[in-house]
Amino acid sequence: MSGAPTPRVDLRELESLRHALHRAPETGFEVSATAATLAERLRTAGLAVTTGVGGSGVVAALQRGQGNAAIGLRADMDALPITERTECAHRSTVEGKFHGCGHDGHATMLLGAAQALAAEGGFEGTVYFVFQPDEENGRGAQAMIDDGLFKRFPMDAIFGLHNLPGLPVGAFATRTGAFTAFEEIFTIEVEGRGGHASSPQHAIDPLVIGSEIVLALQTIVSRALSPGDFGVVSATEFITDGARNILPGTVTIRGDTRGYDDAVSATIEQRMRALVEGIATAHGARANLRYEREFEPTINTATEVQQAAGAARGIAGAQVDDAHAPMGFSEDFARFLRHRPGCFMLLGNGTEGPHGAPLHNPRYDFNDTAMAWGIEYWTRLVRARLAP
């Protein structure tokens, strides 16, 4: 997309930093080197930096004027446990770890915005730059909240930005209400009675029972949910302790479910428990269901979506869709929105080559040309929300 913005920061230096982060990816909460690098750059820019928030998170504060208003801007830092398959010159040097979701780009864009706002001002109030660990496992946001994020750094609202392959560079997308899905994981353990494959009448075959359960789970969305409700139930693993001529004694079924609101979640869990128990009992077996939420649905608030979309529209050449269709993936940023109003925004990463490859694909790479758009968006959002 032509006409890229030119924020007054050293984009070449930021690109170099992004490549350095990409070469040395860290996963989960073990992001100490990444956090230290960002903290050093933030301090150099003149921000007050707190490290170790939620274990390994970083929060940098920038205050201007006498205003009492405050907002949070969040980026994630962690990589994925995937081996990279790109041909990029800055490809990962750590086997089995890779920035396959663009968190290296997210962190660099937020750092660039902090540098620009520290140098130029143009707002009145406080901005908290929140660098989160362990987004991919859905644990980092809650860890920072439990460590007093919103008490130690009181903010009126919080905003997030994530790249999206398939969306052109310079394009922005968001929506009011549910934007990304919850993810809940389940484990079903069926205990039957094993035996010889030649004598099934003496066994209680959990493989057959488990197969019946897997098929029955598909009726939850088609028959227990309203046609207007979004829901997904996916069984992804089926494990037995049987062999070629041995009927198994146990079967384990694992999978996940997704949707956009708590009523759908409750219906899925309730129906799943009834199906698992009923089918197992009918066959004389025992079954246990473990069901737990990994990610909350991302629920954007109307005022913050309006402000975020307005900031994006202020960038010359930007394409902004503030009524985008909900996305089926999940995002740990959602937990912050359980405590504060806010908006999660998507930024185009490009449509071709590694920039258009899906997130979490070993051939994906963050698009450096998107960096200027992200930095410009962040700075405009701060100046609009915290106008002097």
Image (cartoon, rainbow, N blue to C red):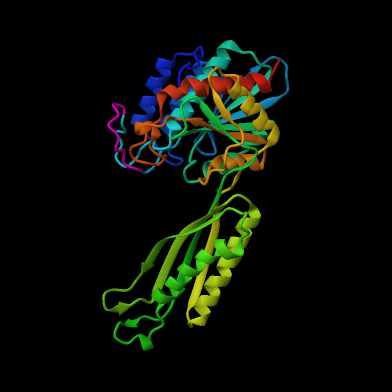
Closer to us: 235 or 140: 235
Q: Position of residue 99 (x, y in %)?
A: 39, 35
Q: Position of residue 220 (x, y in %)?
A: 56, 64
In the picture, measured across the screen, residue 11 lies left or right of residue 49, that is left
Q: Quadrant of residue 117?
A: top right
Regarding residue 154, the answer to whether it shows in the image is no
Q: Which quadrant: the N terminus?
A: top left
Q: Position of residue 107 (x, y in %)?
A: 48, 28
Query: In the rendered image of this protein, does residue 139 appear above or below residue 273?
Result: above
Most common secondary structure along the magenta stretch = loop
Q: Position of residue 124 (x, y in %)?
A: 69, 17
Query: In the rendered image of this protein, does residue 140 appear above or below residue 47?
Result: below
Per the image, is 29 magenta? no
Q: How many marks?
A: 0
In the picture, measured across the screen, residue 227 lies left or right of residue 188, that is right
Closer to us: 365 or 47: 365
Closer to us: 76 or 148: 76
Tell me where the magenta segment starts and ends, as one range: 82-90
Q: Residue at x 44, y 37 (%)?
A: 78
Q: Quadrant of residue 126?
A: top right
Q: Residue at x 65, y 43 (%)?
A: 338
Q: Residue at x 71, y 15 (%)?
A: 388
Q: Quadrant of residue 240?
A: bottom left
Regarding residue 246, the answer to whether it shows in the image is yes
